[in-house]
């Protein structure tokens, strides 16, 4: 099957940015941009017709202005690093401060705002590459990154791989916004969520930096061990800090990151699987201001712990030379309700 490729837009120096379509009209279909490795579209045939499952923007300039990380590959370090700084082996490093005093999703020009190289592609697979030089956003070491999207009739996989020539923090994930209803008029928080997480990371305040505590979800709105609607959670100080959900859920000890999101409106079900120990749950409340009229989507971001380089109680996040970072995210879609 030949991949369908088109010019989606051009950068200021007239460099073309390509969009590649994976899949076919009979099954799951995705469109991925070389800019940011963005998952711009993911759709599935349902009883209601072909249903769009993620939020996307119409043109390249919209993505270049976007501050919500719509569909991007987030890195070099997804999520937050407190104070935009960390220390390793006795040396201090200062990173871009692009979220107040803190560092978020790789800084002012993280991986989601870079033009990736298309290494190879066909109708079912797209492999992208990016070389992040030492000093980019303040990070030590040159990082060679590959992102491979692969599609089947009902499954999309995103394989993220990296290696470095010096010790450096690495935490890569996908940042798609899911509204499985396929209708922006249907609230994204009407979706039903279950996550195999028995703990979560409380945050200190509205800056959303974890306190370092790993707290039980029992008796809190962060308990999704039994499937329930995202909306309607009881008032909780943590939800006040974030204006809703924007918190890291921690998997049960020794368990893979697994989550299920379902839309009662469309009957579409998403099953997510990843080897990572945590899942950032974000309900897209910032989109009301950043993209009025777009609606909301739910981000399910499998990853390591936020602020891990500064928090000794969290699992380490430093990639050493000779190691290979490998993170396979599997999204399985069904439309049988």
Image (tube, rainbow, N blue to C red):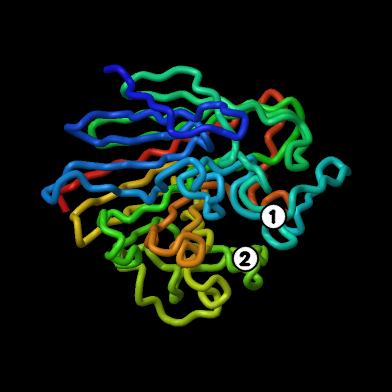
Crowd band around label 2 with a 10 angstrom C-alpha radius: few (<14), some (14–19), many (20+): many
Which residue is pictured at 44% across the width and 42% down the height? 59
Which residue is pictured at 65% across the width and 26% down the height? 131
Per the image, the residue denoted by label 2 is: 208
Q: Residue furthest bottom?
A: 235
Q: In the image, 72: left or right of 273?
A: right
Q: Position of residue 87 (x, y in %)?
A: 82, 47
Q: Is residue 75 above or below residue 267?
A: above
Q: Position of residue 21 (x, y in %)?
A: 34, 30
Which residue is pictured at 19% across the width and 32% down the height? 25
Q: In this view, does 321 lie above or below 55?
A: above
Q: Give the quadrant of the N terminus.
A: top left
Q: Distance between the residues labelled 1 and 2?
A: 14 Å
Whether residue 145 appears in this view of the structure is no
Per the image, the residue denoted by label 1 is: 98
Q: Position of residue 55 (x, y in %)?
A: 38, 51
Numbered disc in front, either 1 or 2:
1
Q: Where is residue 129 in the image (x, y as percent from the top left)?
A: 55, 25
Q: What element carries label 1?
A: loop
Q: Is mark 2 on a helix, strand or loop?
A: loop
> Which badge, 1 or 2, comes first in the chain's sequence?
1
Contact check, label 1 and label 2, Cβ < 8 Å? no
Which residue is pictured at 16% across the width and 53% down the height? 337
């Amino acid at each position: 099957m030949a991949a369908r490729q088109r010019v989606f837009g051009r950068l200021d120096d007239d460099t073309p940015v390509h969009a590649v379509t994976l899949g076919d009209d009979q099954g799951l279909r995705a469109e991925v941009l070389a800019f940011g490795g963005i998952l711009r579209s993911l759709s599935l045939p349902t009883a209601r017709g072909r249903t769009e499952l993620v939020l996307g923007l119409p043109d390249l300039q919209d993505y270049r202005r976007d501050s919500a990380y719509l569909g991007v590959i987030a890195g070099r370090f997804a999520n937050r690093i407190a104070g935009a700084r960390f220390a390793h082996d006795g040396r201090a490093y200062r990173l871009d401060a692009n979220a107040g005093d803190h560092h978020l999703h790789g800084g002012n020009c993280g991986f989601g705002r870079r033009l990736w190289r298309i290494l190879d592609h066909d109708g079912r697979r797209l492999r992208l590459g990016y070389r992040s030089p030492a000093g980019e956003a303040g990070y030590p070491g040159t990082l060679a990154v590959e992102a491979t999207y692969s599609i089947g009739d009902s499954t999309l996989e995103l394989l993220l791989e990296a290696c470095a020539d010096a010790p450096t923090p690495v935490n890569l994930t996908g940042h798609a916004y899911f509204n499985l209803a396929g209708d922006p008029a249907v609230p994204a928080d009407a979706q039903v969520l279950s996550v195999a997480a028995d703990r979560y990371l409380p945050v200190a305040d509205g800056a959303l930096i974890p306190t370092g505590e790993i707290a039980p979800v029992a008796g809190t709105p962060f308990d999704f061990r039994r499937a329930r609607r995202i909306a309607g959670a009881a008032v909780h100080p943590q939800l006040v800090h974030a204006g809703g959900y924007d918190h890291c859920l921690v998997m049960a000890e020794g368990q893979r990151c697994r989550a299920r999101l379902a839309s009662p409106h469309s009957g579409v079900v998403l099953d997510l699987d990843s080897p990572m120990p945590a899942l950032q749950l974000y309900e897209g409340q910032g989109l009301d201001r950043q993209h009025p009229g777009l609606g909301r989507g739910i981000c399910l971001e499998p990853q390591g712990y936020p602020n891990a380089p500064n928090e000794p109680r969290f699992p380490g996040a430093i990639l050493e030379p000779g190691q290979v970072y490998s993170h396979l995210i599997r999204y399985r879609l069904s439309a049988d309700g």
